[in-house]
């Protein structure tokens, strides 16, 4: 699965306590040749290491151990290297397995616990900045889930929707410009009311920025009959046929996505400047980590590709690199940034990812403080 499938409900399920052991396997992957040639070998080695961990754990009986190994084998057989991104996460118990391809790197780890390791999923979801895109016409509406890199049509919440319509009657058509229009028909108004109702349900379950694609009369009428589209992050006034492909949609949305990113960056810069002015600002990994642990962070901004291995020493984080990294040391945290992101979201903070080097003077990560 991709990170845009990680809804709040699914995340809650993944975090639920499970019979020991719930196995989490994470590893970095590569999108292109020749680097991706090593991924299959690394995965086999990591699965073998997971098997050894299971064999050596006295709390895991033979039946459970065998079942989890079988689930891992099924997962490995299903991994599609053509869909590889920057990390692979496999979650497995005796009864299930899940495969996640992430657009954010993750360290090589095998974890046995009574819950799945979700911090890498959460951080990748936050970084991906997923959105909804609604394509709409007088008689059809499709909903797409997307990020800056990928999109796919969703079949949720009643979407896609097609309006039942009688055969065209030229005598009833009105014209808007040069375009034959049915946007004054009550049937069309009722259809778009239904679109609005279904869309409100999706947004209530999984709030995201919303982009709209359709002819100007369709978008105007949708605004008029409902309320879910009024705060849309961007609009593309262009015809939206029912067979619009995800690739075509992303191409059409690109200017709107870039415009929103510029507004978003300026907004975050303004919030950080304002926080510095009132001395409610934390900069650098150690300061932000402390603020998050104390639930004082209101907004956490992180550079997109910032990763740091640290050693926890007396409640402080000491960066470690090269020969100083000993992953067998329980005080060493290889994925501290992802751990911080998950903790920040759990505390109710907003987490945003910004362009590399934009927070260089603040140690690559910064936060506004609630108090």
Image: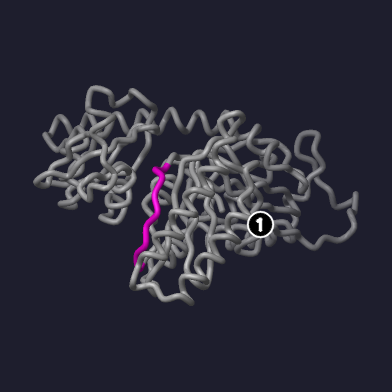
Q: Is residue 282 magenta?
A: no
Q: Nearer the viewer, residue 98 or 351?
A: 98
Count of numbered labels shown in the rendering: 1
Q: Is residue 259 above or below residue 288?
A: above
Q: Is residue 105 above or below residue 183?
A: above
Residue 88 vs residue 55: left or right?
right
- What percent of the width, then of the height, locates residue 65? 46, 70
Kind of element beneath mark 1:
helix
Which residue has dot 1 on it? 192
Q: Residue at x 30, y 37 (%)?
A: 301
Q: Residue at x 22, y 27 (%)?
A: 362
Q: Is residue 107 magenta?
A: yes
Q: Is residue 290 above or below residue 273?
A: below
Residue 202 vs residue 186: left or right?
left
Residue 74 vs residue 15: left or right?
right
Q: Nearer the viewer, residue 238 or 223?
A: 238
- What percent of the width, then of the height, locates residue 231? 48, 46
Task: Indicate the colouring scheme.
Answer: one colour
- Tell me which corner region of the image, top left, top right, bottom left or bottom right, holds residue 324: top left
Q: Residue at x 36, y 71 (%)?
A: 17
Pointer 1: residues within 10 angstroms few (<14), some, or many (20+)? many
- What percent of the width, then of the height, locates residue 277? 14, 30
- What percent of the width, then of the height, locates residue 162? 75, 59
Q: Which residues are magenta?
A: 106-114
Please identify the residue farthest to the left as the structure is shown. Answer: 314
Q: Nearer the viewer, residue 278 or 20?
A: 20
Q: Residue at x 52, y 65 (%)?
A: 69
């Amino acid at each position: 699965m991709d990170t845009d499938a990680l809804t709040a409900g699914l995340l809650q399920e993944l975090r639920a306590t499970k019979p020991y052991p719930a196995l989490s396997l994470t590893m970095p992957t590569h999108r292109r040749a020749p680097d991706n040639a090593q991924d299959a070998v690394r995965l086999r080695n990591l699965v073998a290491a997971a098997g050894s961990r299971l064999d050596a754990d006295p709390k895991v009986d033979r039946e459970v151990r065998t079942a989890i190994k079988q689930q891992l084998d099924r997962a490995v057989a299903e991994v599609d290297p053509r869909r590889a991104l920057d990390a692979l996460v496999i979650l497995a118990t005796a009864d299930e397995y899940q495969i996640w391809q992430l657009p954010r790197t993750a360290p090589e780890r095998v974890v046995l616990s009574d819950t799945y390791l979700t911090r890498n999923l959460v951080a990748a979801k936050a970084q991906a900045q997923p959105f909804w895109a609604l394509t709409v016409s007088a008689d059809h509406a499709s909903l797409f889930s997307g990020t800056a890199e990928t999109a796919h049509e969703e079949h949720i919440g009643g979407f896609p929707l097609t309006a039942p319509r009688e055969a065209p009657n030229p005598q009833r058509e009105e014209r808007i410009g040069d375009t034959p229009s049915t946007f004054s028909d009550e049937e069309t108004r009722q259809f778009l009311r239904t679109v609005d109702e279904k869309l409100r349900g999706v947004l209530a379950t999984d709030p995201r920025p919303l982009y709209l694609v359709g002819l100007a009369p369709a978008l105007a009428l949708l605004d008029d009959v409902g309320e879910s589209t009024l705060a849309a992050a961007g609009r593309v006034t262009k015809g939206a046929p029912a067979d619009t492909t995800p690739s075509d949609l992303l191409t059409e949305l690109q200017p709107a996505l870039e415009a929103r990113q510029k507004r978003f960056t300026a907004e975050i810069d303004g919030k950080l400047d304002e926080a510095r002015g009132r001395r409610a600002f934390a900069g650098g990994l150690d300061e932000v980590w402390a603020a998050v642990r104390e639930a004082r962070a209101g907004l956490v901004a992180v550079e997109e590709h910032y990763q740091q291995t640290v050693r926890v020493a007396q409640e402080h984080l000491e960066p470690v690199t090269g020969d100083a990294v000993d992953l067998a040391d329980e005080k060493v945290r290889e994925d501290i940034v992802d751990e911080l992101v998950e903790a920040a979201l759990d505390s109710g903070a907003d987490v945003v990812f910004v362009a590399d080097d934009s927070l260089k003077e603040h140690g690559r990560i910064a936060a506004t403080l609630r108090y």
